[in-house]
Structure formats: C-alpha cells, structure tokens
Image (cartoon, rainbow, N blue to C red):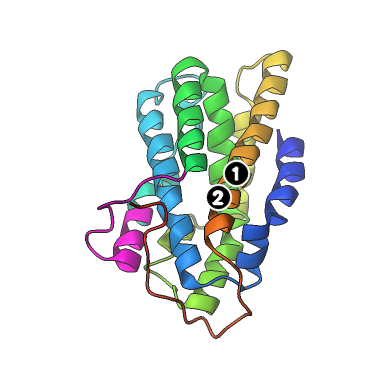
Amino acid sequence: MRIAKRAEHENTRQSPFMADLLDGRLKAEAFAALSRQLWFIYRELEDAAESLANHHLVGPLLDPALLRVPALERDLAHLDGPHWAQGLVPLPATRRYCARVREVARAWPAGYAAHHYTRYMGDLAGGQIVRVLAAKTWGHTHEGALFYHFDIRNPSAYRRRYRATLDALPMSEDETHRVAREVTHVFHLNNMLFHDLAELHAPTEPSNGAGTSPTRTGSS
C-alpha cells in the first residue's frame, strides 16, 4: 500500500491544478474551491466511519484527532461567510469520489481502510505543504486553512504508529493486494477532482497573495 501511495502521490503533485496551486499561480478562490469540494468527501468519509467504528479492519484506524469536517466547516465559514453551504454542490468528480466511498463502506470495509489511509495520512504529511502555502500566499494562518492543522504533537511518529496498526490488520495477502489497488484508485479519483478544478481555475503569475472575492465552485 505504501509503495502504491508513493507512486501515485507523485502523479498527484504533478497534476496541473496542484502544480499551479503549489507554485502560487492560482488565486485564493481556487484554494477555497478545493476546500468546498473536500467538505463533501470528508463528510462522506466521516459519516461512514461512524457506521464502521466497531469493524475489526476499520475501528483500529479511527481517531477523533484525524476528523476534518469540523475544521473544514470553520474554514468555509471564514472563506464564504455564515451561509457557505447554501447552493454548494459537488463537482462531477466529487460525486464519483463520494459514491465510491459509500460503496466500499457498505460492501467492502477493507476498501474503506484504503481510503482512510490515503486521505488522512496524505493530509498529515503532504497537506502540510499546502498549510504553509495558504499562510504565505493568502494569509490563511488559522481560519481558512484549519483543515491542514492537526492537533497531533508529532505527526511523523503518529504516521509510524498508524502504519504499524495498518500492517497488523488481519488481511490475507490477496486482500492486501486488492486494498493496494484501491489506494491507486483513490489517487485516480483525487486527480479527477483536480482535473475538474483545473477546468474552472486558470493559473496566473505569482502575486502578493491577493485573491478574488469568493464564488461558488460548482454552484448553480
């Protein structure tokens, strides 16, 4: 799973949307648009986690310190105002992503573990690059980028413990390979989201971080 994640993570970093975001070529609205779509995905992940909390393959991975929906909702209230949810709809890629999370949570909990591992450990590691970018480029040192702030004292040690827990899950070799393929699929779904966002947000020259006023990505 870790090998699959490393290979696909590099593809994600090279996606046009993320490359432009990390290079400071996108305006603040693009960052906000990503947060809006992530809210749908993490709401699906965390709703499913509640139903799988006692499952022997999922329960050991769950931790309230990882939950992202409350932080995302505070971010969106800061970025879009108190009525941020009105008219907010998922992009096509987000709908497909959420549908896959629902499917594996219902029919294949080991597949849900692949989604949990890929998303949350990615946020705890590579997502910190975006946290620094949000502060430097758009001034989001707290609200607006809370999604990337974890109440975890030592993220590196936490990731090691998480991986040890994952390694200890009672899965057959065949199931482990199947889960590794799902990790690759998670990155594919994520890249499709970046493709949809890239269609809506064109890069500009790096600026002093001043963005445009928020619009509703994917809203009617």
SS class of the residue under badge 1? helix
- The residue at which mark 1 appears reads as 192
Q: Which residues are magenta?
A: 72-91
In the drawing, does residue 33 fall left or right of residue 207?
A: left
Label 1 close to label 2 by CB (< 8 Å): yes
Magenta residue check for 28 = no
Residue 52 in percent (x, y) is at 41, 24
Residue 219 in percent (x, y) is at 35, 52
Magenta residue check for 81 = yes
Q: Residue at x 73, y 16 (%)?
A: 173
- Which quarter of the picture shows residue 81? bottom left
Residue 65's disc number: none
- The residue at which mark 2 appears reads as 196
> Label 1 neighbourhood size at 10 Å, few (<14), some (14-19), many (20+)?
some
The amino acid type of the residue labelled 2 equals: Asp
Q: Residue at x 62, y 59 (%)?
A: 17
Between 15 and 38, which is closer to the camera in this rendering?
15
Query: Relative to 137, is 149 above or below?
Result: above
Q: How many marks?
A: 2
Query: Relative to 105, is 165 above or below?
Result: below
SS class of the residue under badge 2? helix
Residue 154 in view of the camera = no
Q: Residue furthest bottom?
A: 208
